[in-house]
Image (cartoon, rainbow, N blue to C red):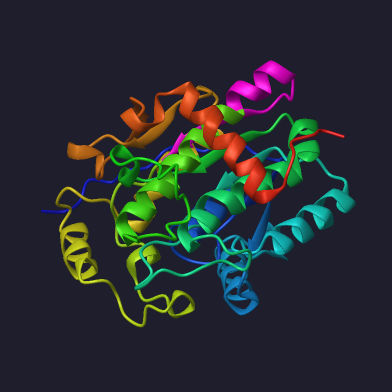
Amino acid sequence: MPRRQIDITIPDLTGKRAVVTGASDGMGLRIATRLAAAGAEVIMPVRNPAKGEAAISGIRRSHPHATVSLRTLDLSSLRSVAALGGTLRDEGRPIHLLINNAGVMRPPNRQSTADGFELQFGTNHLGHFALVAQLLPLLSAGRARVTSQISVAARSGKINWDDPNWERSYNGMRAYSQSKIAFGLFGLELERRSRAHGWGITSNLSHPGVAPTSLLAARPEIGRGGNVPQYRLIQALSSRGILLGTVETAGLPALMAATDPGAKAGALYGPSGPGNLGGAPAEQRLYPPLRSADDAARAWEISERLTKTAFVTA
């Protein structure tokens, strides 16, 4: 059975400056391509310059007039995050869209970031937390919309409050779930604090459902030499249009959350099919672990302490 075509309309983004993390391949590259095709100037902060250059070449082949450029970023290093923040602040141009898309999932064993954090917590959540803090003056100047990409893994689980870096025991999937819960709580608390302090930012969440993205493929940089066992099944179901999405459709909830004039602050967008695993993007009810404002404030305070960052607009 042929797969039903799923897409959304991206508004004209001429004059907008967008930053997309994790845009050198897979779903992030599709997101960056769609933004550039809609007229946005797209900044692609990447860890691997060669992959980044190949990604930009691909965008320009399909959209010769696209305005895209690379910057250097390793979200597992707070020094790298601070350097990117300094670079973009020196450029002095407002940012209108920020899509926090990059992430890592289930390394074969517990690994640490350059700053000693558990890799998933440090990359998926703390690195992005620090990045938003670094870019806050530019985001405020652009009255930006910040969209943070979480996961269906945030539907259940909890934050390991007593040991957020999983130093006493380690479960890779639970640590991944924690990283996405913390990241989702951050996105919601960012919206609350923006309203309270007049930052002018709107913040919401998205998730891609399940699709054969690079997240579960071979990732030598985190010690995974081959695809995870489930990857072949995900590919097979996706190719047959059964339950799951594709790399192209997986990016649509983030694009809707980031660009749709009707997308709501403090809301979650994801696929609307069975189990929210695939299908057309739509607003969804917040997952239970994301509904506590007290947990969000607590996660924010812990993240400030661990990253030694503060959110100031000047």
Tell me the quadrant of the picture where the C terminus can be found: top right
Percent of width and height locating residue 84: 75, 58
- Which residue sits at x=67%, y=28%? 201
Residue 305 position, x and y percent, is 66, 43
- Along the horizontal axis of the image, is 308 left or right of 231? right
Question: In the image, what residue occupies the spot 20% across and 66% down?
Answer: 230
Q: Nearer the viewer, residue 89 or 107?
A: 107
Q: Tell me if residue 166 comes above or below residue 131 in the rendering.
A: below
Residue 270 in view (yes/no): yes
Q: Is residue 195 magenta?
A: yes
Residue range in magenta is: 191-206
Percent from the top left, x then y, of residue 56?
62, 68
Q: Quadrant of residue 187?
A: top right
The quarter holding residue 17 reads top right
Q: Residue at x 45, y 26 (%)?
A: 267
Count of numbered badges drawn on the protein: 0
Camera-side residue of 147 and 66: 147
210 or 69: nearer the viewer: 210
Q: Is residue 301 above or below residue 82?
A: above
What residue is rendered at 88% in x and 46% in y?
92
Say left or right for 110 vs 297: left
The stretch drawn in magenta includes residue 242: no
In the picture, measured across the screen, residue 309 lies left or right of residue 31, that is right
